[in-house]
């Protein structure tokens, strides 16, 4: 990335763009995964359910339907009386139970776990899978919140079975927190996609090879599951099955003499009610878990920001700025940054950010969301340093906007700097166990070298018989390895790791308690295989 020059400018009036979000947020990774579905930078969760009838497993299976049912089966352990259970990822430990037959659940984890990290847990990704499945299949937008806590053991039994009677089903749903009308709505919305796997329920389908669908439009999130039931032309095997013992949908749909199903026959109401009931489903969590506010697309978001000691008394400062251009003409927008030094003095110069060219520098999400990317790279005076920056949007025919991150600027500490060139992962065995060494180097400002310096590495350990891994932060102390260089001292630490854990993340940490400074979520897979001496 080429260096950008500093250009003089006058101070501009400050306009409010986002009154809620403040960067950085603990939910930034979730927001990225949810909204960056295609384009220049993408996480691709929608790939697993696009088109709506897609499944990487083939055989007529449908991932969108399986993702939704995985989330429900996970949530089904909730008990409103005790506050235990809910959508917590515990289903990964419950797959040996008769109430969770088949491969659909592991297939769901096989996809979502590729996006899992210390900042995006299994439970949050299962909840997001419901949101993405609905939108990929022309269903409603479901409000999404983050903050679920992953369980590391099985929950209680509680998934309803098709051969149970109506009283049992009603009691199970009530235990989960849903009344009769909500039970009917949950089942109708959950069965608008997909069908019954004969391999899992041959007693319902007649053979292991059959895969009867719930309605005639099983690849579209619509209310045909309702209208076909009310019109007595249903194809739902849980309504018209020859063995009435397994006709659980018929019993549930008629539980209030079709009052709820009649209301769901209105397509607009069906979409509204499905959005509401699915939001409640994915927000049903253990009582000691507090979820975030609804995560909405961020208007202006710094991304991949880097700051490191570059020599000649300079700091290298670079990264990208993501601008939401859903309601803007990106061709009319240019971007620059204005920064404050370590003493909070505002610079009278700006740093230009250039729109990326590959794929027009744009990412896309559901609901026609568009994000345009602008990159910047420059050098700053190491003596003056940096404490925060603002983003300036220049739009043709409109006043410039200064985005101040809700008034405080986008914070950036220069107390500790991750030095990527002086850090490495050689990928060479260093012992009989075949482990590799990882070396992390940071520059610590001279006034803070008396404080502890360390890196927290995320260990990902396999759990026997379970698709998910356990995460553990492992701290490695870093020691001073240099004399003073441009007001900083280098600290370095080395840790031996199992080579299967070559791709994880780490944080560089300075200090303790309220005065801690961090450089977070650095990728080990991005590390070079050799460390370079500083010059």
Image: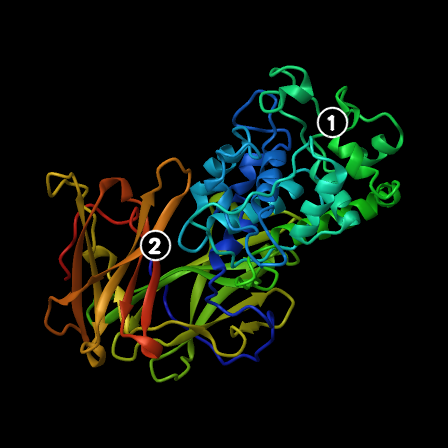
Q: Which tag, 2 or 1, sits closer to the chain's start?
A: 2
Query: Which mark lies nearer to you, 2 or 1?
Result: 1
Residue 245 disc label: 1
Q: Position of residue 504 (x, y in %)?
A: 32, 48
Q: Secondary structure at mark 1?
A: helix
* Residue plotted at (71% across, 41% down): 169
Occupied quadrant, residue 400: bottom right
Q: Position of residue 458 (x, y in %)?
A: 31, 53
Residue 44 horizontal side relative to residue 445, left or right: right
Q: Report the coloring of the rendering.
A: rainbow
Residue 121 horizontal side relative to residue 255, left or right: left
> Does residue 330 lie above or below 209 as drawn?
below
Decide which of 279, 237 is in the foreground and name it.
237
Res 310 visible: no
Return the residue at label 2.
1
* Residue plotted at (76% across, 39% down): 166
Residue 341 horizontal side relative to residue 486, left or right: right
Circle 1 packing at 10 Å, graded few (<14), some (14-19), many (20+), is some
């Amino acid at each position: 990335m080429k260096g950008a020059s500093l250009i003089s400018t006058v101070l501009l009036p400050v306009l409010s763009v986002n009154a809620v979000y403040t960067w950085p947020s603990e939910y930034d990774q979730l927001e990225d995964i949810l909204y960056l579905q295609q384009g220049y930078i993408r996480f691709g969760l929608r790939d697993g359910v696009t088109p709506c009838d897609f499944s990487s497993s083939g055989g007529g299976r449908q991932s969108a339907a399986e993702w939704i049912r995985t989330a429900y089966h996970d949530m089904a352990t909730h008990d409103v009386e005790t506050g235990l259970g809910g959508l917590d990822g515990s289903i990964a430990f419950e797959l040996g139970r008769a109430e969770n037959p088949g491969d659909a659940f592991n297939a769901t984890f096989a996809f979502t776990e590729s996006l899992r990290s210390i900042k995006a847990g299994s439970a949050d990704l299962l909840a997001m899978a419901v949101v993405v499945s609905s939108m990929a299949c022309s269903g409603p937008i479901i409000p999404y919140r983050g903050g679920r806590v992953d369980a590391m053991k099985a929950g209680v039994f509680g998934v309803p079975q098709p051969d149970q009677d109506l009283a049992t089903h009603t009691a199970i749903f009530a235990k989960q927190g849903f009344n009769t009308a909500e039970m009917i709505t949950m089942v109708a919305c959950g069965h608008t996609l997909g069908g019954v796997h004969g391999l899992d329920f041959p007693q319902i389908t007649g053979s292991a090879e059959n895969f009867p669908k719930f309605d005639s439009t099983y690849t579209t999130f619509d209310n045909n599951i309702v209208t076909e039931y009310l019109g007595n032309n249903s194809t739902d095997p849980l309504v018209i099955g020859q063995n009435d013992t397994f006709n659980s949908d018929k019993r549930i749909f008629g539980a209030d003499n079709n009052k709820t199903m009649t209301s769901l026959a209105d397509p607009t109401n069906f979409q509204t009610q499905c959005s509401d009931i699915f939001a409640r489903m994915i927000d049903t969590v253990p009582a000691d878990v507090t979820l975030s506010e609804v995560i909405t697309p961020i208007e202006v978001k710094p991304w991949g920001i880097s700051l490191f000691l570059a020599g000649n008394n300079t700091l290298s400062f670079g990264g990208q700025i993501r601008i939401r251009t859903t309601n803007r003409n990106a061709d009319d927008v240019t971007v620059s940054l204005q920064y404050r030094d370590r003493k909070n003095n505002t610079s009278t110069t700006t740093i230009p950010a250039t729109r990326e060219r590959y794929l027009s520098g744009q990412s896309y999400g559901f609901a026609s969301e568009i994000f345009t990317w602008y990159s910047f790279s420059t050098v700053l005076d190491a003596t003056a340093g940096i404490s925060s920056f603002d983003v300036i949007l220049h739009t043709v025919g409109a006043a410039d906007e200064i985005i101040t991150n809700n008034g405080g600027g986008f914070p950036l500490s220069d107390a500790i700097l991750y030095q990527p060139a002086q850090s490495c992962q050689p990928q060479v065995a260093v012992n009989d166990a075949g482990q590799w060494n990882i070396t992390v180097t940071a520059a610590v400002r001279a006034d803070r070298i008396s404080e502890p310096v360390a890196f927290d590495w995320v260990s990902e350990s396999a759990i026997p018989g379970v698709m998910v891994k356990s995460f553990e932060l492992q701290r490695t102390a870093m020691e001073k390895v240099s004399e003073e260089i441009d007001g900083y001292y280098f600290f370095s630490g080395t840790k031996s790791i199992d080579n299967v854990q070559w791709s994880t993340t780490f944080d560089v940490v300075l200090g303790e308690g309220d005065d801690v400074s961090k450089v977070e979520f650095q990728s080990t897979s991005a590390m070079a295989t050799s460390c370079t001496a500083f010059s």
